[in-house]
């Protein structure tokens, strides 16, 4: 959209091809009708003074009406051309004035409705109206001596007849020109409002599309996190168990059998969780309709797999457990799951310590190990990214990094909606096991 210097920087776009074609047809029709009216005026002896020759009369008629063909392409220019031609025809006592006046009102309206520079359009229209009223007063004052003495014999009103005639002529012309100005202004305002509505509709459409894209991206990230947590954890456990089974296959068949059973169980768990995710996707991803199948209450069973994989695991729950929203409970479970996965895959640790603390205003999940404590080999980092996204979704904080005394720590804090009661004398409920 080209900007002009209107009130708000908006410029009305030019006419369409159909509108231009319509203007040409209207101009041809009005010109033909004006020429016919000129013939009628001459035949009826209409006389505003010594008339010009017939060819000149035709020229004035065409000069006033033919420019209507370009009235919406060049609204201000055409308004000035028609106004000058109209006054010129008046000066030359042109017999045809009815359709000429109509053409003047038309271009005055068009200048207001279609002028691309609205401030200049106002100036041009005010100038034309001022010129027309000035010309009217001038023509009346210069023709006072030509008024017959018996011109107002039938006058009976309270006003002087000459004054009444002048006021009537001026008032009628002001009203006519004022209406042309007003309706042109109204048409421009309506076009601007239509443009604003179209812009707002386009903005709403873009906002809707962006919201849809964000929703799709959010769903993809959620699925990516779930797949990473489920597949990476179970595959890591199965890899560790398979390695242990291979090492003791000949020396300790019973222990190898136990490791294979753990692999089988991990595979079943992975398949079950994948089926659950696929079921949610088939139903449009409406996770709010299906409760979470994992949570903090299943952390201990999660750690059993780590024990079977050869880790010495300590698990403690501190404070008084309170009911948690499914999404928060699942997020806490996934934090522990990803920590166990990273410990098994990358840390080379022998001990894992997992603690869940129910504090006054938050839930704290902490996992530490005694492994290498350095960055993840290969720099993948998807697990940590997923943990940060889960914590951020619940307005929590995450700390992850090596400890000074060795090993790696992951600590996540989730704010609770209501204060959770904490026993001052409550000791930890600790479960310890060694593989």
Image (cartoon, helix red, strand yellow):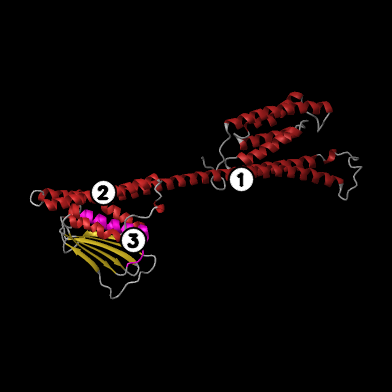
Quadrant housing residue 298: bottom left
Left or right: residue 219 versus residue 40 is left
Pointer 1 local density, CA inside 10 Å: few below 14, some 14–19, many at least 20 = some
Pointer 2 local density, CA inside 10 Å: few below 14, some 14–19, many at least 20 = few
Q: Is residue 216 magenta?
A: no
Quadrant for the C terminus in the image: bottom left
Q: CA distance from mark 1 to mark 3?
A: 51 Å
Whether residue 203 is situated above or below residue 34 in the rendered picture? below
Q: Which mark is residue 189?
A: 1
For marks 3 and 2, give the one nearer the viewer. 2
Quadrant housing residue 372: bottom left
Residue 153 lies, in percent from the top left, at: 92, 42
Residue 85 lies, in percent from the top left, at: 69, 33
Q: Which mark is residue 268?
A: 2
The residue range painted magenta reads: 321-342
Question: Which residue matches tag 3?
Answer: 396
Nearest the eye: 239 or 139:
239
Q: Between disc 2 and disc 1, whose residue precedes?
A: 1
Q: Between disc 1 and disc 3, whose residue precedes?
A: 1
Camera sees residue 91:
no
């Amino acid at each position: 959209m080209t900007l002009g210097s209107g009130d708000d920087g908006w410029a009305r776009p030019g006419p369409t091809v159909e509108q231009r074609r319509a203007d040409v047809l209207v101009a041809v029709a009005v010109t033909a009708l004006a020429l016919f009216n000129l013939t009628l005026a001459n035949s009826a002896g209409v006389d505003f003074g010594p008339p010009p020759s017939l060819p000149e009369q035709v020229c004035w008629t065409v000069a006033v009406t033919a420019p209507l063909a370009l009235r919406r392409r060049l609204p201000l220019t055409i308004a000035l051309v028609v106004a000058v031609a109209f006054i010129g025809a008046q000066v030359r006592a042109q017999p045809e004035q009815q359709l000429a006046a109509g053409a003047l009102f038309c271009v005055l309206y068009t200048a207001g409705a279609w002028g691309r520079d609205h401030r200049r359009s106002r100036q041009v229209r005010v100038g034309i109206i001022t010129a027309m009223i000035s010309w009217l007063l001038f023509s009346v004052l210069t023709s006072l001596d030509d008024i017959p003495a018996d011109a107002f014999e039938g006058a009976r009103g309270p006003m002087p007849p000459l004054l009444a005639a002048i006021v009537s002529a001026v008032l009628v012309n002001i009203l006519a020109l004022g209406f042309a100005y007003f309706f042109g202004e109204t048409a421009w305002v309506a076009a601007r409002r239509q443009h604003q509505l179209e812009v707002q509709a386009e903005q709403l459409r873009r906002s809707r599309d962006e919201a849809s894209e964000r929703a799709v991206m959010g769903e993809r990230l959620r699925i990516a996190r779930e797949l990473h947590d489920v597949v990476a954890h179970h595959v890591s456990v199965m890899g560790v168990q398979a390695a242990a089974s291979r090492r003791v296959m000949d020396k300790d068949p019973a222990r190898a059998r136990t490791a294979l059973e753990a692999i089988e169980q991990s595979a079943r768990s992975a398949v079950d969780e994948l089926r659950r995710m696929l079921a949610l996707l088939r139903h449009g991803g409406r996770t709010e309709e299906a409760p979470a199948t994992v949570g903090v209450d299943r952390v201990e069973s999660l750690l059993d797999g780590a024990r079977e994989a050869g880790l010495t695991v300590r698990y403690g729950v501190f404070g008084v457990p309170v009911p948690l929203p499914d999404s928060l409970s699942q997020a806490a479970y996934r934090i522990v799951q990803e920590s166990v996965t990273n410990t098994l895959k990358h840390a080379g640790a022998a001990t894992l310590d997992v603690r869940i603390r129910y504090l006054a205003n938050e839930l704290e999940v902490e996992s530490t190990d005694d492994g290498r404590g350095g960055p993840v080999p290969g720099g993948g980092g998807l697990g940590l990214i997923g943990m940060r996204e889960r914590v951020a979704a619940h307005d929590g904080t995450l700390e992850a990094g090596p400890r000074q005394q060795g090993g790696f720590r992951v600590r996540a804090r989730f704010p609770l909606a209501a204060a959770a009661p904490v026993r001052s004398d409550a000791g930890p409920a600790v479960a310890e096991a060694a593989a």
